[in-house]
Amino acid sequence: MGGVAAGGGERVEDMTDASQESLAGIKGISEEEYLHCIRCGLCSYTCPVYRVLVTETFSPRGRVALIRAAGQAEVDPGKNFGDKFYSCTLCAACSQVCPSGVKVDELLLGIREELAGRDLLPPALAHLSRTIRETHNISGEDNTVRLIWSENLEHPPIGSGRETAEVVYFVGCVGSFFPRSYAIPQAFVQTLETAGVDYALLGGNEWCCGYPLLVNGLPSEAEEAIRHNVARVRATGASKIVFTCPSCYHIWKHTYPQIAGSEMDALEMLHATEFLADLIDQGKLHLREMNQTVTYHDPCDLGRKSKVYEAPRRVLQSIPGLTLVEMSDNRENSLCCGGGGNLETYEAELVTALSARRLAQAKQTGAQVIVSACQQCERTLANASRQQRARLRVLDITEVVWKATEL
Amino acid sequence: MLEQTIIAELEHVVGEANVLASPEDLICYSYDGTFAEHRPDVIVLPRTPEEISKVMRVAYREGIPVVPRGMASGLAAGSVPFSGGITLSLTRMNQILEIDAVNMTAAVEAGVITAYLQEVVEAQGLFYPPDPASIKQCSLGGNVACNAGGPRCLKYGVTADYVMGLTVVLADGRIIHAGGKSIKNVTGYNLVQLFVGSEGTLGIVAEVLVRLITKPQYVQTALGIFPRLDDASRAVNSILATGVVPATLEMMDETAIACIEEAMQLGLPLDKEAILILEADGNDEAAVLREIEIIANICRQSGASEVKIAQDEAERADLWRARRSLLPSLARRAPNQLLEDVTVPRSEIPEMVQRVKQISHKYNLPVVIFGHAGDGNLHPTILFDKRDETQWAQAQQAVGDTFAAAVELGGTLSGEHGVGVLKRDYMESALGFASLEVQRQIKQGLDPKNILNPGKIFPAGPPPIQGRQL
């Protein structure tokens, strides 16, 4: 045992020499949490980033080791340290698979908060935070033009400018401002109108939900947006909010109640897939035949992180003629497309490599279409499909349902 | 620290991006699947055997220790670089080079993940049987270096039984190709088997040619629940005496069951001393069904209170998920584990289990017992908190007692994890002086400067490390 004891002893000596600039006492991260990591390495297999970079420093196990080393004052938590934590989509596959129960995704959010507090947020991400603070959206556009996506619809959405309604449709920044994603809110409002849903859009009163700030480790900066959005939704008297964006849905469902408290009591939050499934169950949508084979990609924020797996599958299976086939990694084991965690802002090239792996899984199913339920997954996978000249279309589930809706 | 000129030379060989030396990188390459840790001076990630060769030429010339590393899930601290130097990470060498369906072989680079190889060959109706519990987080190179086993070994054999050829880079940078696709080969010494299990101390395994078999079409899995652990042990021998060879025969004791249940809530019984997971497989469905019935009957006759046969793939997957999650789930009980893999003649399993329980009692440390009961390979796992000095000292004594018990019963220290650092001090007691001396001479012959994974396998002390002290 001599060698091991010597190794351990040396580590203890290192601790006494280390810099005072330690992370000892990382906010909300207890020593027990990272000591539960027994370094089995199972998380590396499921980590989409590790499988591409094949470097321990960019594996979940490596990141937990770095957090531990910082907590024990063995490494300076400077810029080089900080940079190791942003090549990550926060897909939470590591937490899902960890048999020791280490909540790796919470550790990763905790460390991002610590790093942001030390002014170590990478410039591109700091710029994103600033844009959101100043313009209330991720694009830096004038927030009053939030309904620009609706301009080439035949008529303005019924929900636009409505002061009261039963349901608020919270569009989200990407659907509002990224032309490639306009089709999603366009399809969804037309479906809502066909089903006779009494809904409102917040337009310029909708602010960025705050999720990108949370992901940047700046939860306190999201608080203003949270209070604002909740107040605007309450002003409509709505009892339900529906989201086409899984990230908006996730923060509303998990973080908003912590900040807005009882203000949220009477509000039911539903992802579009859940809302559509209900409409179909109630016989409010009549779907016509679509003779296609599709595969469904579970978005991380909707599936693994919000546990919504069945609603989107029920929606797809209720379309006559449509065949749903599963990819090898599905539901809680879904492989991240690469679009999460603000990774696209930080390191776009890595996203390309990640999405190629997911596309390969989709190709293996023989499906003609990849259906997702997230505008970011849709963009990411569509880019991959185009780059590889794959004969595989990528659609959001709202687009599929609108195509199938009988008028 | 290595001189900057040497770092530059390594960067020239593999590219700047594939030489890592930041404090963060050194921390992340300082450990394996144990609690042991020591930082290397630099990490080099080669892409080809030729690049490995060039790295070795530099290391040989300068006398720098080189520690090969795959997914670093090892359980003997074999890839922890206690002497510093170069950690040679083979994870970029992750391509399957060829699947030859006619000769039924696969040629792979050392960094191919074992589960990935299995997935790819099984899609073609072929089968690579070795299945270490860490199958998703280990690579073929590491499997060869440690001669990895797994639950299926009882029927199908260990990694060594499937390795037909190797590309190995020697300490001085020479590349050799040993073995090949010929099934019979007595042309000279069997160098392939010399390198299998050598733990990176004789050469760097760069590429592996493995034998494949056809995939068994039918599998049946049974769970036997035993109120008494002794009965479970005896059932193992009774089953094998009938001539039925189960594909696997796994045992878990009550502490193991409780840990898994806490982690996964699979509905396992918490008031029984042991469970056996037994599997029969083959290409004749009727024969497989008959075998699982025989197995189930013997379990019942030997004292099982209940025998369940998995009814579908989902139930079967749950049983295996439980078994594979056992080790990590032990972390819920104590921050540190010493996972041993002593092996005894099968007839001695009940006695070995009793002795381990006595050792647990003697040192007042919980010991979980599980393992591949069919081949006598047990994994007594001592749970402790290394931060408590008394517990740490007692855990080490308990390990020594466990090794002594195994050797006394005609067994040995390690069935499948390897020696690494954790078992090296017990080598002479297990092998005897002369046998150990022969192994030292082989090491000396192939690695005269002692730069390949120095300090592993052989007990500390003379002969000293001859490489340059770093």
Image: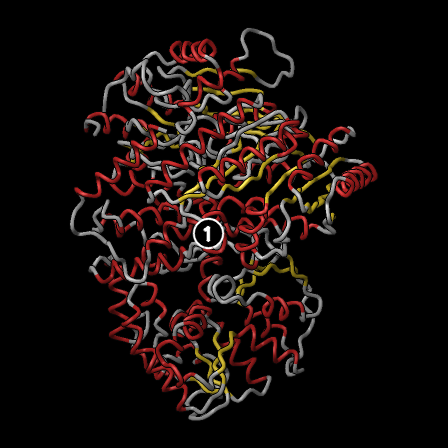
Residue appearing at x 49%, y 84% in the figure:
A240
Q: Amino acid at mark 1?
A: Arg
Quadrant of the drawing holding the C terminus of chain B: top left
Left or right: residue B60 versus residue B233 is: left
Is residue A202 or residue A58 the one in the foreground? A58
Please determine whether, in this image, residue B289 is positioned above or below residue B410: below
Which quadrant of the structure image shows residue A38? top left
Which quadrant of the structure image shows residue B25? top left
Where residue A287 appears, as percent x and y from the top left, is 66, 75
What residue is shown with label 1? Answer: B332
Where residue B203 appears, as percent x and y from the top left, is 42, 19
Is residue B298 or residue A214 the one in the foreground? B298
Residue positioned most to the front? B362
Which quadrant of the structure image shows residue A371? bottom right
SS state under label 1:
helix
Residue A224 visible in the current orientation: yes
Where residue A406 appears, as percent x and y from the top left, is 65, 79
